[in-house]
Amino acid sequence: MPKLEFRFAHPPANCIPGNRIRLKRFVCLNSTGSEQPVPTAVFAVDEQQKIERQIEFATRAAALVKDETTGQRFRSFAEELKRKLFRMMRRGEVRARAYELWEQAGRPTDRDLDFWLEAEREIEVEREERKGSGA
């Protein structure tokens, strides 16, 4: 199972930043003052749910407003959020696939970009195959 790490701009108040392998990670101070890693996947899920709610609200607002210009702006905003959500989800897929490729290659150093690009290419090929088969 690949280890997932996510970047986020605002850590919880009791967290301090720390760097590991060019990815931002945070640790929280527990009640005894010792450090514990933050379950970063929770933050990504929260962000995804937040965007999904915003899409829902913008779509509802577009249907309710009488002014066509305002309705179009709400629809455009909803489409922009959908694209953002797609990119966010795709980034997670690429990250997981790149990690698999890296592990399969014996965890070499200084080839992170190679694995990332290969993962992007493989995912895009799979997506095109699914699109071509009508799935």
Image (spheres, helix red, strand yellow):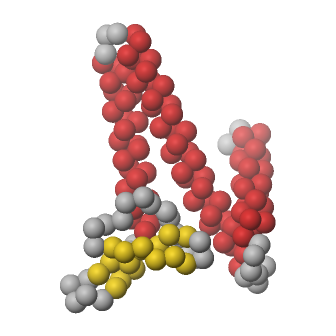
Q: Quadrant of the C terminus?
A: top right
Front in this rendered view, residue 16 or 6? 16
Is residue 2 found left or right of 50 in the rendered image?
right
Residue 105 is situated, as x and y percent measured from the top left of the image, at 78, 79
Q: Is residue 112 above or below residue 10?
A: below
Front in this rendered view, residue 64 or 7? 7
Q: Quadrant of the N terminus?
A: bottom right
Q: Residue furthest top?
A: 67
Residue 113 is situated, as x and y percent measured from the top left of the image, at 74, 65
The residue at the point 71 percent across, 79 percent down is: 103
Q: Residue furthest left?
A: 31
The residue at the point 55 percent across, 52 percent down is: 89
Front in this rendered view, residue 59 or 10? 10
Q: Quadrant of residue 28?
A: bottom left
Q: Count the numbered circles shown.
A: 0
Q: Quadrant of residue 62?
A: top left
Is residue 79 found left or right of 47 in the rendered image?
right
The residue at the point 49 percent across, 63 percent down is: 7
Q: Quadrant of residue 132?
A: top right
Q: Is residue 133 above or below residue 58?
A: below
In this orientation, does residue 101 appear?
A: no
Residue 124 is situated, as x and y percent measured from the top left of the image, at 74, 50
Residue 119 is situated, as x and y percent measured from the top left of the image, at 73, 61
The residue at the point 57 percent across, 59 percent down is: 92
Is residue 15 found left or right of 85 in the rendered image?
left
Is residue 94 found left or right of 35 in the rendered image?
right
In this orientation, does residue 79 appear?
A: yes
